[in-house]
Image (spheres, rainbow, N blue to C red):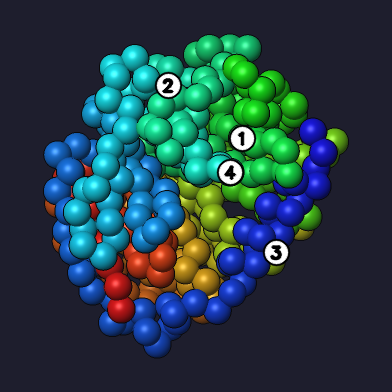
Amino acid sequence: MSTEAFKSHSDQHLARILKHSVYTAQTVASIRCEKTLTCKDRTYAVVSMPDNTFATAHHTRTQINIWNLESGEMTDSIGRRKDDYTFVWDMCSLSNNKLACASVEHGIKIFDMDDGIVCNTITAPDANAYVGASGHKSIIGFSSETNDFLATAMRNGTCMIFDVSVNGGAVVKTLKGHEDSVFCIETLPKGQIATGSGDETIKIWNVQDETCVTTINAHFEGVLSLCLVGENQLASGGGPEDPVIRIWNIATGENLLELEGHEGAIRHMVSLGGGILASASDDKTVKVWDTTSGKCLTTLTGHRDGVKVVELVYGKIITCANDEEIKIWTI
């Protein structure tokens, strides 16, 4: 695998993080819930789609739902066949209107969204190695001019990178070193990847030569979520007995800041741009933070169970919880 595709992806990811957003320390206080959607299932993943729509994947339903962001209406669903997949833990978009869905039971399925069918199934050397963790960012997609790739968190303590343009997938990189399941992964600048594991550490990897350059002892119950928040800053979220967000210097592993206030495991995080971070927790809330000062700017309430996902879609915040509701927030 040429690493240029991944470096380009990581540069674009950083540019989005650094870009000034409508969400600032001043505007965050005016965030309000615009719509509440009932989906009759727990939602574990959200992906932005073309034409002001977004896709959701769920705990038990054997389909992916497509929603119109403005109207809140479900406009389509795909994957109705029972053998396509079940229990999708994470999704990501690929080139040519394709969507990758990670499932413990059936590995990774690539859907062609133009006709709603499975066009490829990715298999690992260990069929039981795929990670299953609701709300965790466990797959990341990126593309070259000719090929699509997936970085995937694995139960066997590795992060595997697949060329998914090949039928059945081809392993092109394997990042080995964790002593427990990898729960989450994040793209970093300069062609690097961060992985968070049940072994309580974060590892920073050079993708090109598959080497670990930094190991950070992060959370004593394991690292459940990761999010790039600046050019050299990475946020990590801990479990139910360690519900703290820690900000790390990527190059040195130094703990720069601790964000305290959640009372449950931190399942998912997303950068809102401009140093603003949103975090989803089992305590039924989403908190929005200023990662420069460490201040909690606001707390989004209204979900009746643990919040598993928080995403930014076309400038609006999407939250999903075990209460089987999807909320759309705006300023």
- Near mark 2 (Cα within 10 A), the count class, few <14, some 14-19 or many ≥20, is some
What secondary structure is found at the residue carrying circle 1? strand
- Near mark 1 (Cα within 10 A), the count class, few <14, some 14-19 or many ≥20, is many
Above or below: residue 226 compared with residue 108: below
Q: Considering only order in the chain, which callout, 3 or 4, is on the residue closer to the N terminus?
A: 4
Determine the CA span between mark 3 and mark 1. Answer: 23 Å
Name which residue lies at 50% across and 43% down.
97
Name the residue beneath numbered marker 2. Answer: 104
Name which residue lies at 35% across and 46% down.
55
Determine the CA span between mark 2 and mark 1. Answer: 16 Å
Disc 3 marks a residue whose amino acid type is Asn
Q: Considering only order in the chain, which callout, 2 or 3, is on the residue closer to the N terminus?
A: 2
Q: Considering only order in the chain, which callout, 1 or 3, is on the residue closer to the N terminus?
A: 1
Front one among 276 and 114: 114
Name the residue beneath numbered marker 3. Answer: 232
Disc 4 marks a residue whose amino acid type is Ser
Name which residue lies at 16% across and 58% down.
36
Q: Residue furthest front?
A: 115
Name which residue lies at 32% across and 33% down.
78
Q: Considering only order in the chain, which callout, 1 or 2, is on the residue closer to the N terminus?
A: 2
Q: Are the residues at dot 2 and dot 1 in contact (C-beta closer than 8 Å)?
A: no
Name the residue beneath numbered marker 4. Answer: 95
Where is residue 219 shown, x and y percent of the image?
A: 52, 45
Q: Which dot marks residue 150? A: 1
What secondary structure is found at the residue carrying circle 2? loop
Where is residue 144 shown, x and y percent of the image?
A: 72, 43
